[in-house]
Amino acid sequence: MYRRILIANRADCAVRLIRACHEEGIEAYVITSRDEQARLAHALADGVICTGASMDAYLAEDDILEAARLHGCEAILPGWGFLSEDALFARRCRLAHIDFIGPGEGHLWAFGDKLETVRLLSDTRQHGVMTAEEALADLGSVPMPCMLKGRFGGGGKQVTRMTERESLGVRLSALRDMSRLRDYYVEPYIDGRHIEYQVMGDGCGHVHVLGARDCTWQNGHQKYMELSYEDADQAALRAARDGVCVRLSELGYRGYGTVEFIVDRDGGAHLLELNPRLQVEHGVTEMTSGIDIVRTAIRLAWSGRYEPVAVPANVEEAIEFRLFARGTGRIGRIGFDGYDWPGYPQPEDALGRVETGYACGAEISGVYDGMIARFILGAPLGKARACMQKWLSGFVVEGGRHNLNDLYDQP
């Protein structure tokens, strides 16, 4: 097994990855920026390495690779965001004889383009999905409303719902004038549930489906709550999922991935994309599947064998709520009454877990995505949402605006 891994991430993601390394008996070093305050990740890591200033520290490929080499890290674990889907960085890791824990560079290239992903993994070209160039050339053929989406990048970025054909034409013309038209595509807007599957490929022709999640709860295309999903009565969705998994198997897919669909009101399944990285909401599937996804990926990268790592879990339903800052400011108080943050009480008749990179007094700068904490809970079937609301009724966060009320406001 690896002796030392470099974590190329920060905050709650870094904390999660460090924990997985330590549970495997691996030393975890973490990168940081010069202007980052002392974080929980720094306190948990076996070593902290500065690789630059602000956001650049987490994208500084030369410095990150040099840090791994100088400190004897045999692998780099990026998690999500930053360099996690960067095919060029994965190639540079390979050439430097450092393992990149995640899908290989070939699959990162293939699935980094969302439009080509749909065409590669769908049995037939989905009606109404077209390049931005095609849409601009024939605006009358674009189904309305539609979604104008960036072909590259994740996290709900570069996604705009368009309801008027004229406005779409203006937007596409502006992109053409900026020589950015090739970076976008258009697909029909479908009113339905956002369902995703957590998969893990072994690289030997097998793709394992670990579970499904409902990620319909979003603000501005940013997910804030995810619930485990039962697809037993969704024949079209299961068929679409199986078709994607067969294609991934044929491609020799290796590592974790998330296949995302929109399920319309008639039960039809429409492929959105495949994210070839660890997903923020992977903890939901860990609770229902009883598999530690991060530790399994580490072992797969080390040995080339798919060896699921079991974790204590006996839940019928799981949910995750993401606590986001809505603006900048200093966290004045945070935590559950009577518990020293990030300590927390176990919810009654449920299994809970909290992942955060922030503590009392931490500054929310606005440079990063603003996620303060993730609350993950397993509960009896049909009870997860209510259990989460009850659990967080004793939680307090002061200093700046946040989205805690989203847990209670949405149906």
Image: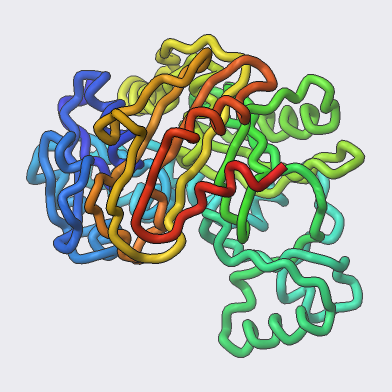
Query: Residue at left 20%, top 49%?
Result: 31
223 or 375, which lies in front?
A: 375
Q: Position of residue 217 (x, y in %)?
A: 65, 46
360 or 290, which lies in front?
A: 360
Q: Tell me if 209 is positioned left or right of 267 in this view.
A: left
Q: Quadrant of the C terminus?
A: top right
Q: Position of residue 38 (x, y in %)?
A: 15, 50
Q: Coloured how?
A: rainbow
Image vertical order of residue 169 relative to residue 307, above or below: below
Query: Residue at left 16%, top 44%?
Result: 68
Q: Position of residue 298 (x, y in %)?
A: 34, 27
Q: Position of residue 104 (x, y in %)?
A: 43, 40
Query: Residue at left 24%, top 53%?
Result: 362
Image vertical order of residue 85 relative to residue 344, above or below: below
Query: Residue at left 71%, top 73%?
Result: 132
For the question of whether residue 250 can be seen, the reply is no
The number of numbered badges drawn on the structure is: 0
Q: Quadrant of the N terminus?
A: top left
Q: Tell me if 271 is positioned left or right of 76 in this view.
A: right
373 or 69, which lies in front?
A: 373
Q: Quadrant of residue 150?
A: bottom right
Q: Tell me if 248 is positioned left or right of 281 in this view.
A: right
